[in-house]
Structures are given as C-alpha cells and as structure tokens.
Image (tube, coloured by chain):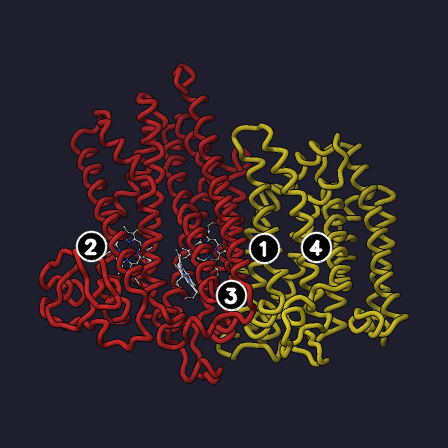
Chain colours: A yellow, B red
Amino acid sequence: MMLGIIVFFLLASLLFYVIFGGADFGAGILELIARKKDSARTQELTYRALGPVWEANHMWLILAVVILFVGFPQAYAILSTHLHIPLMIMLLGIVLRGTMFIFRHYDAVKDGSQIWYARLFAWSSFLTPLFLGMILGGTILGQIDLEANSFFEAYLAPWLNGFSIWLGLFFCLVSAFLASIFLTIESRQESEKHQLSRKAFQINVLMFGMGGIGLVGAGFFDTNINLAAGVLHHYWEGYQGWLVMGVGSLLWGATQYCLFTNKYSIARILGVGEVSVVLLGWIWLQHPAMIIFKDGTNLSLTQAAAPDATLMSLGWALIIGSVLIFPALFYLFKVFKQ
Amino acid sequence: MTDLLAARMQMAVSLGFHIVFACIGMVMPFLMAAAHWRYLKTGREIYKQLSLSWAKGVAIFFATGAVSGTVLSFELGTLWPEFMKHAGPIFGMPFSLEGTAFFIEAIALGIFLYGWGKINRWVHFGSGIVVGISGVLSGILVVAANGWMNSPTGFEGDLLSGNVYNIDPIAAMFNAAWFSQALHMTLAAFVATGFAVAGVHAFQLLKHPNSEFHRIAMTIAMIFGSVAALLQPISGDISAKDVANRQPAKLAAMEAHFETEKGADLLIGGIPYEEEGVVRYGIHIPNALSFLAFGDFDAEVVGLNDIPKEEHPPVAVTHFAFQIMVGAGSLLMLLAVIFLWWRWRRKDIAWPGWFLKVLAAATPLGFIAVEAGWTVTEVGRQPWIIYGVMKTSEALTPMPGLVWSFGITTTVYVLLSLMVIWLMRRQIRVVNQSFEPANPKS
Ligand code: HDD
Ligand code: HEM
Ligand code: HEM
C-alpha cells in the first residue's frame, strides 16, 4: 500500500520533471536554434515565462532523487555507480544553465558578458536533457553489468551506445516541443505566437519520425543487430504495446491539428498528453522491471524497496508534503501564468 | 592522489561551496524582511530600495545554492554508493521532509522575487518570511542527517552486511547530535551572513561616508549578526560537551589531547606532532578542558593513546580548524559587544572609521569559522563515515579515476565563486551610482 503511494509520487515527480523541467531545457534549445535576429526576443520571452518558476520546476528532480535514495536505495546505488559519468555531465549542465540563466538576468551591468551567459545557457540547455535521456537509456537498455571487470564494460558501455544517444536526442526534441507549445501561450504577439506554433508543429513531426525509426528498427531487427530491440520489442508484443502506440499517435494527430488551426490552449493540453503517454506508456510496458541488467535479469521497484518502517515514514512525509506543496504551487502558477 | 582522497576532497569542496550559499539562503530572507517591514511601516522609499537591491543579489546566491545542492544529492551516490545503499533508508527521513521545505522555499522565492506590485503587499511580505523559515528548516533537517552520521541510532543489527532490523527513521532523525548541531549551525548561518553583509556595507561606508543607504543596510545586518554572535559560544559549549560524551576521539583531535588524564588542560594554539604525540608552542590553561567538556575541573578526558591507532582522526587538521573557529568566534563576539554597546549608548553618532575598517576586514570571518567548524565535524569523524559503524573507505564507489571528477568539480566551483564575487561588485557599483549621484567617487 505505502509502496504504491511512494511509486505514485516517484512517477509523478518523474513525469512533472520531464514536462516542466523539459520545457525549461527546451526554452534554451529554442534559443540555440533561433535565428540571430529573433534571439533577443526569445530571451525576453524565456525570462518572463521561466523566471518565477524555474526553481520550482527543478524541485521535481530533487524529489525523485530523494525518493530513490530513501525508498529504493539499492537502485540509487547501482545507477549512481554505473552511470557516474553521464550523471556528472548532466550535473555540470544543470549547474551551468541554472547559474547562467540567473546571471544573465541579474547582472547589474548589461555588457558583452551577456553573450557568454546566453551561449552557455543555450548549450547547457541542450547538454542536460541529452544526458538525462542517455541516463534513462542506460537504465533500461540492459547493458549494466554488475560483474563487469573492465572500465569500459562497467562505466561506459551502459550509456555510451546508439540507443542511449537516440533517447537523449529524442528527449531534446521533446523538450523543445514542450517549450514551444508553452511559450506559444506565453507570448503576447500574434506573429510570434504563429512562429512558435509552427516550430512546435515541425518539432512534433521530427519526434514522430524519430520515435518511428526507433520502433520500426526494433520491430525488424533482433538484438544482435540492434541493442535497442531488447527494450523496444515490448511495443510489438501483445495488445498493450499497440494500445500505447495507438493512443500516442491519436494524441499526436490531434495536437498537430490544433497547432495547425491555431487552437493553442488545446494544443498545449494535447501535447502534454502526448508526451505523458510516451513516458508512462513505456513505464507501463516494461514494469515491473526498472533497471535491466546485461545478463537479462532486472531489478524491480519492489525488489529494491527499503524496509517497511522506512516506506511508512517516507510515504507520510510525501503525503503531508504534497498537502502543503500543491496549493502553494497552484498559487504560484496562478499569479504568474494567467 | 588515491581515489579515496579524491572523493573526500570532492565532497569537501562541494559541501564547502554549498554551505556558503545555504547560509546566505537561510539568512538573507530575514534581512530583506526586516528592510521590507520598515518600508511597509514607514513608507520610506530607501527601505524598499534596500530590500530590492538585496533581492537582486540574493537571486544570484539562491540559484547557485540550488544547483550546488542538486549536485550534492547526486554526489552522495556517485561517490559513496555503499554508504547510501545501507544508510539511505535509515537516515533518509530528514531528506524526505527537506524535499517539502525546498519546494515551499522555491515557490515562495518565486513569489517574493517576482511579486512586487503584482500581489497584496502583505502577502508579498509574508512570502519573504516563508522563504526564510523554510530555508532554516531545511538547514536544520539536513544537519540532523549529518548528526546521524556522528551518532547513528534508529536501527539494530549489522549495517555492513545489510542485516538490519527494527529500523526507526524518526529515532534516527532525532539522534543525539541533531539538536546541538542544528542549533549551532543555524546561529552560525546568522553570524556568518550578518557579518559578511555588514562588512560589505561598512566598506562602502568608508568610501561614501554620508550614504544613508549603506548605514541602514549595515545596521540591519549587524543586529542579526551580533545577537547570533553572542549566543554562538554558548551553543558551541553545548556542542563541545556533546562531542566529549559521544565522540571522544574527535574531542581528543580537536584539542590535540594525546594522553588520557584527569584534570586536563585546555590547549590554545600549538602545533601537534602526531608521530611523537606531543604539542609544541601551545598555551595551556590548567584543568579548563575537563571543565569545558564535562563541567568538572577534575573529570577524566580520554586521550588519543586510549583510542586504537587506526581509528585516529587527522589530529593537526582538526586541531587547527577548531582553533580557527573558536578564534574567529571570539573576535566576532567582541565586535558584536562593541556594536551593541555603541548603538545603545550613542544612537545618533556616526560610526568611527576604525570600527568600519575592522568590520570590513571581518567580512569573511564568519564564513571562515563555518568552513573551519565543518572541517572539525567531518575530519574529526574520520576514519568513520558513520561513526563506529562504517569506515569512509568502505563506502567509496568502485569507479577509478575519481581525480578527474574532483578536478572538474573544483574548477567549476572556483570559477563560479569568482563570477559571483565579480557580479556582486558590479551590483554594488550600480547601487552606488543610483544612490550617490552627487558623489564624484562613485
Ligand atoms: C560562525 C560560525 C561559528 C562560530 C563563531 C563558532 N562555530 Fe563551532 N561550528 C560551526 C560554526 C561556528 C559550524 C560550521 O556550524 C559547525 C560544524 C558542524 C556544526 O554543527 O556546526 C561547528 C562545529 C562545532 C563543534 C563540533 C560539533 C560536532 O562535531 O558535533 C564544536 C565543539 C564547536 N563548533 C564549538 C564552538 C565553540 C566552543 C565556539 C566558540 C566561540 C564556536 N564553535 C564558534
Ligand atoms: C549536513 C550535511 C552533510 C552531510 C550529509 C555530509 C556528508 C559527508 C560525507 C558523506 C562525506 C564523505 C565521507 C567522509 O569523509 O566521512 C563528507 C566529508 C566531508 N565533509 Fe561533510 N557532510 C555534510 C556537511 C558538511 C559541510 C557543510 C561541510 C563544509 C565545509 C562539510 C565538510 C566536509 C569535509 C571537509 C569532508 C572531508 C572529510 C575527510 O574526508 O577528511 N560537510 N561529508
Ligand atoms: C550543513 C549542511 C547544509 C545546509 C545547512 C544546507 C542548507 C540549505 C539551504 C538553506 C538551502 C536553500 C538555500 C538556497 O537555495 O540557496 C539549500 C539548498 C539545497 N541543498 Fe543544502 N544544505 C546543506 C547540505 C546539503 C546536502 C548534504 C545536500 C544533499 C544531499 C543538500 C541538498 C540541497 C539541495 C538539493 C538544495 C536545493 C534546494 C533549492 O533549490 O532550494 N544540502 N541547502
């Protein structure tokens, strides 16, 4: 029972981090790909949209990590050992983009250093989700080998592979997509809204293409040719996989339609739905496995769970916390995001 | 450099960096609230300007504090996975509560920094207070977790083999060390931030003697810093008595106390020679250590000779760090007394230049004491990561090449520190320009 509640909070914080943190990264990626003459305007918009909420958006990551190390210590220990290197790189990205975002805005003197803040912010906004995606990839790909005896096998192979990079890039696209559908609504100029929604449309097409390549690749090749087949085959087995793909595609189509017809608020809801289905659907397909190992075995949340007394106190802490957090969060968004 | 050393250094650098921003994050909201309160009461613009200028600086510190805290919550795993695997479920309670405190803090901060003119002024004022309270709460919680590493409780069985039962996360949180450490740390944050802010404004007062802005700012910061600085030695004494009971090896290292004896002397200064087990050039105060540690001039104080050699903490580092903390604490207390006395006796006379100079020179002193104090606590606990239960070497990640991650972490943090200092100087320059337009120097 308590385990269920804790898993619920873990999934919720993961989902919220992907959505809100992702939109946050995406804003930086959009700056990266914006044309020079638009970039000042994009920056202005990013700041207005993110300023008040960026710190809260990143709390979801902290929450997920805390739940992991208190409630599922074994999983935390394995991941942080074998994914040490990508975690460090991701942290570097988090440090750089958080500080550069704030420095850029709060530097009392606006001079040439602005260019550097902006550059570092934009590049680290790309680096962070790339490696976050690679870390997720490493978790599920099945290349973590607890018995490995070479440095490469133990600390590089799990995440330095085609599948993880694919997932990392996919997550960058997801981030940029979320940012553009959110910013479409924040923007106060018709022309800019139009431009952003077109961008969202294009990125969504790319996402579909990239997801499709992965799934088809997994469907046609076996694990000898394509490591990812070991993970993605779930999609081609049983009705569940078809259900996830079906609902995802439907939402995708509906999002595109709304973007095309300028129904921005509905597009935002559908787009978030689309991303949630991709993430939650996948977790549903591979559950109960969480970390997949090279020898084919896996670690499930139940196996990794801490003793009952810990789960009880963690669960209550989360319940009580959410009673305090959600109204406050609601108020924050209400004040700044009418 | 061995992997173990690299990991320990990386942990020390990351924590030493974070703690500065954490202290500022805990205390600045109260300073801003004080200025804000004066503004709401008197309606004088200068108070609002002060609160706003501080808020600009604070946004920079908060962002840096938040990201360096995020780094820490991963580093506990990337560097010490064995520790986290076994200890996480036991000492995790404060961290899970802390998550809430952080969240509330981040939300309230967003409202506070961006809410000027957007929401009711009292709600806005309240949001600043909430930032401060949740900051202090998260500080207390995380220190309670650290307290558990010094005095592990709340479980039975053998932690190392994973064969533990009767886990009680609440008892682990309220371990024997939590109170003395949390009290001492909270006061330390007020001392360090109060004196640092006062020092910066004192320095500006020397350059712009007529600036009302800097005078008000310095006074508010000094009031907070001074009150805390007067209480700090009392709380330090509670801490010392606690350590004496719970971690005799740490006390022995702090005092470079090599031989067990009754009626032990308090040592001030001196250079410990660990190999020979002697201290040279120190000042001895007869029987004072026994009294300070146990409240009895003739109490027996365990020396390092009664502790197995492989369980000795590094004596010299611990001893020097302790001397630095107490030295800094005594100086700051003296400054606090002078300040409070002066304010009480001669309210409206301008501050003498020498006092401003001393305050300006003391800007970093509180933070030096904080770093030194943590060095005492952490190095004095060695070789244990969980006192008496798990050795630091047993907790280390198997990944080799940690010197790289230590090097990168250190480089990033050094650069960030330099940038923050540079940004603050630019901040102050702009403030001066907008407040002393007539002053040719600014
Ligand atoms: C402004 C900072 C500051 C000042 C002025 C002092 N301290 Fe301190 N001290 C700290 C900041 C600090 C700290 C950084 O906050 C520590 C580290 C761990 C802790 O709980 O507080 C600490 C630890 C610490 C410990 C070890 C606690 C433990 O390991 O559990 C002792 C025995 C003292 N202090 C004693 C003193 C005494 C007798 C002081 C007399 C003036 C003093 N401190 C001033
Ligand atoms: C309250 C939260 C803290 C926790 C949970 C914590 C935890 C740890 C851990 C796990 C280590 C590595 C293992 C070890 O060396 O024992 C460590 C080492 C260290 N920490 Fe802390 N620490 C905390 C606060 C701090 C702070 C604020 C400082 C500030 C300077 C600090 C300074 C150090 C130092 C200097 C070391 C290296 C000690 C050595 O290896 O000789 N710690 N800490
Ligand atoms: C004695 C040691 C510590 C104290 C007093 C302390 C206190 C604080 C405070 C007051 C804040 C909020 C202020 C700010 O954002 O600038 C903060 C932020 C944070 N700390 Fe620490 N901390 C300590 C050590 C640690 C350790 C060991 C960890 C990791 C496990 C940690 C994790 C975090 C995180 C994740 C944040 C970001 C929260 C936010 O964005 O508001 N801290 N810390």
Horizontal side of residue B101 vs B375, given as left or right: right
Q: Is residue A151 above or below residue B220?
A: below
Where does residue A115 sit, x and y in percent of width and height? 63, 34
Name the chain letter of the residue that bears numbered label 3.
B
Where does residue A254 sit, x and y in percent of width and height? 86, 53
Q: Which residue is mark 2?
A: B269
Horizontal side of residue B142 vs A271, given as left or right: left
Which circle marks residue A91 in the picture? Answer: 1
Q: Which residue is mark 3?
A: B79
Which circle marks residue A130 in the picture? Answer: 4
Element marked by disc 3: helix
Q: Amino acid at mark 4?
A: Leu
User: Which residue lies at the image location 83% right of the left edge and 73% below the top edge?
Assistant: A233
Q: Is mark 3 within 8 Å of ligand 2?
A: yes
Q: Judge by depth and name the residue closer to the eye, A178 or B158.
A: B158
Distance from the alpha carbon under mark 4 to that under mark 3: 23 Å
Name the chain letter of the residue that bears numbered label 4.
A
Give the label, 4 or 3, closer to the camera. 3
Q: Amino acid at mark 3?
A: Leu
User: Which residue lies at the image location 57% right of the left edge and 73% below the top edge?
Assistant: A72
User: Which is more N-terminal, label 3 or label 2?
Assistant: 3
Give the label, 3 or 1, closer to the camera. 3
Name the chain letter of the residue that bears numbered label 1.
A
Q: Amino acid at mark 2?
A: Gly
